[in-house]
Amino acid sequence: MSLTTEQQYFSDKAALLDPRAYVMVFTDNFGTGGLVVPQGETWFLVNGWYLASGLSSPDMPWFHRPAHVDKATTLPAGTVLQAWEGAGDQKGIAYYCRPALVTSQDSRYTTDPISLYYNRLATLKTLGLNVTGLKVPKGTPLSTEFFVIFNAPGGAPCMVRHVSLFEVPWAVPSDTSSVTNAAMNVLNEISDTHTLRSAEEVLFPFTAYDQKLAPTGLGGFNTRCANFAGDQTSPQPQDGFAVVHWSQLPTGW
């Protein structure tokens, strides 16, 4: 059925809360020429890292954060998403919502998308908060990284709700249960080696990592030691902490 402009708006807003509508893309998966938003579709970029801007004089990347569904960048039909080749060993990443993945298979998006959106917001208020955290001890050598898993059942639908950083540079959810597979950078940062005190609501859904059920799901998050000067040698000057609040979403979400 054809949706009104208002219904289409809320259908997109509801999809932004649906982990089934999300795609995580890494450097090797953008393909030749990048990913192109098809005609008749709109995508929403919730987190982007080292993406190619298309500028050539000089060539430069672009980023999108913090990761929050209400701050997603709208990608109209014809937009090209591509990893920036100048990043060296850094991975270009895009975490985006593609509503067509769910609107074509879930009738709630066409029969009453407004109620679907507000019912999800109402449900969020009733869900308990799980807390996952990392401590970076004072004196830790600069190159040290830390990883912790979310402990969500593999393939489970979840929602990140809040991120708090104290004297660490960032909190990066990972695509697998490994510190070596960093994915999203949910908050703004100063640098990889500069401590930061930042805390705010972030809101984005994800599917918990499972090797078979959700190989591109999020398994946990990592952080690293940093210092006040942001230099390349000084150890962690005092205890640092990264804390993520998240919820597991109910059946029928």
Image (tube, grey):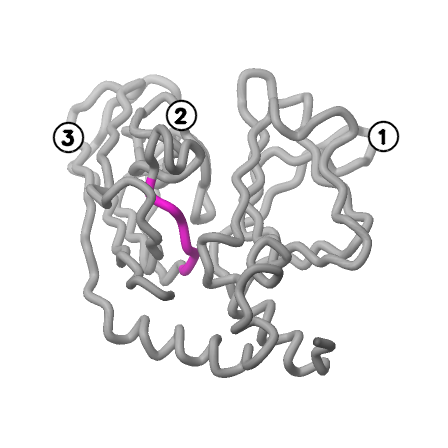
Q: Is residue 74 magenta?
A: no
C-alpha distance separating marks 2 and 1: 32 Å
Label 2: element kind: loop
Instruction: Out of 17 and 184, give the one closest to the viewer.
Output: 17
Please report the residue visible at 59 percent of the width from the left and 63 percent of the height from the top: 103
C-alpha distance separating marks 3 and 2: 25 Å
Within the image, what quadrant is residue 112 found in? Answer: bottom right
Please report the residue visible at 61 percent of the width from the left and 27 percent of the height from the top: 29
Q: Amino acid at mark 1?
A: Ser
For residue 47, say whether it is visible: yes
Residue 116 badge: none
Q: Which numbered disc, 3 or 1, marks the residue that appears first in the sequence? A: 1
Please report the residue visible at 21 percent of the width from the left and 32 percent of the height from the top: 237
Magenta residues span 203-208
C-alpha distance separating marks 3 and 1: 43 Å
Using residue 131 as the reference point, say whether residue 96 is left or right of it.
Answer: right
Quadrant where the C terminus sits is: bottom left
Q: Which residue is mark 2?
A: 181
Q: Which numbered disc, 3 or 2, marks the residue that appears first in the sequence? A: 3
> Percent from the top left, x then y, of residue 129?
21, 61
Q: Which residue is mark 3?
A: 138
> Percent from the top left, x then y, of residue 132?
20, 46
Please report the residue visible at 66 percent of the width from the left and 30 percent of the height from the top: 30
Label 1: element kind: loop
**Label 3 with label 1: CB-CB less than 8 Å:** no
**Label 3 with label 2: CB-CB less than 8 Å:** no
Q: How many marks?
A: 3
> Percent from the top left, x then y, of residue 206?
40, 49
Q: Which numbered disc, 2 or 1, marks the residue that appears first in the sequence? A: 1
Within the image, what quadrant is residue 192 found in? Answer: top left
Q: Which residue is mark 1?
A: 57
**Label 2 with label 1: CB-CB less than 8 Å:** no
